Image (cartoon, rainbow, N blue to C red):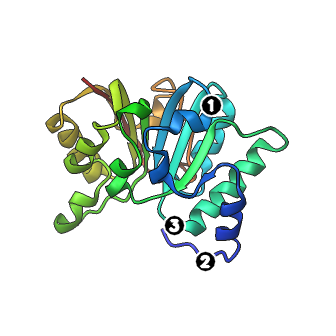
Amino acid sequence: MRIRNKPWAREELDASEIYIKNPEEIKGKWREKFNNNNSIHLELGCGKGYFVKKAGLKNPGINYIAIDLIDTILGVANRNIQEEFGSKNITNILLTRYDVEAINNILDKSDDIERIYINFCNPWPKPRHKKRRLTHVRQLEKYKQFLKQNGEIYFKTDDNGLFKESLEYFEESGFETIKITYNLNEEPDFWDNIETEHEIKFKNEGIKIKAGIFKLK
């Protein structure tokens, strides 16, 4: 996804109370930043923040860490979250810029992550690029280093190939498949779904959304 540069993004992020500028310094201490004992959920590739803004407002008793790699996108996410919360204090969402491939530099078991959300990640369809997938075995092994026992990964995608191969990745990495669907739109009780910007677009185009819940044994 390409997005035009926003000159204001960097300055607004630096001034935002929900943005973590140096996440490596917070490794093992994320709970201290939230200053409570609530569960911590992690969204990888948060984009413009459509998911985390709604999740955070809907679930004030859950803490959310949202990660993306591009300042401009995070700047938009910060604005969207601020707008969603309005006059309410944002106490359960933190944004940070980081490369998910190096995520173990900013999280460990002490952070006790209960759930990971992977929403419509890049499918990287070419064989030479598949190791970059956020659901690839190489990445799943990294998540296991900070995901708590019985922690879960919630995954959804529009891409058939990515979904099919991701099921194999989860099995190879020792995750238990709790349930899957090949058409989330027709299963409203599959989970407490919060639609993303991409999801709404795909649904309007008649594209079936594939989804699954996977548990760390």
Q: Position of residue 192 (x, y in %)?
A: 54, 27
Q: Is residue 54 above or below residue 205?
A: above
The residue beneath circle 1 is: 35
Say which element carries label 1.
Answer: loop
Q: Is residue 5 above or below residue 201?
A: below
Spatial CA span between label 3 and label 1: 27 Å
Along the line of sight, the residue nearer the viewer: 208 or 126: 126
Identify which residue is drawn at 27% across, 60% down.
132
Along the line of sight, the residue nearer the viewer: 179 or 83: 83
Spatial CA span between label 2 and label 3: 10 Å
> In the image, is 81 to the left or to the right of 204?
right
Q: Position of residue 200 (x, y in %)?
A: 56, 49
Residue 213 in view, yes or no? no
Q: Earlier in the sequence, mark 3 or mark 1?
A: 1
Q: Residue 5, labelled with which disc?
A: 2
Identify which residue is drawn at 21% across, 58% down.
131
The residue beneath circle 3 is: 70
Q: Are marks 2 and 1 in contact (CB under 8 Å)?
A: no
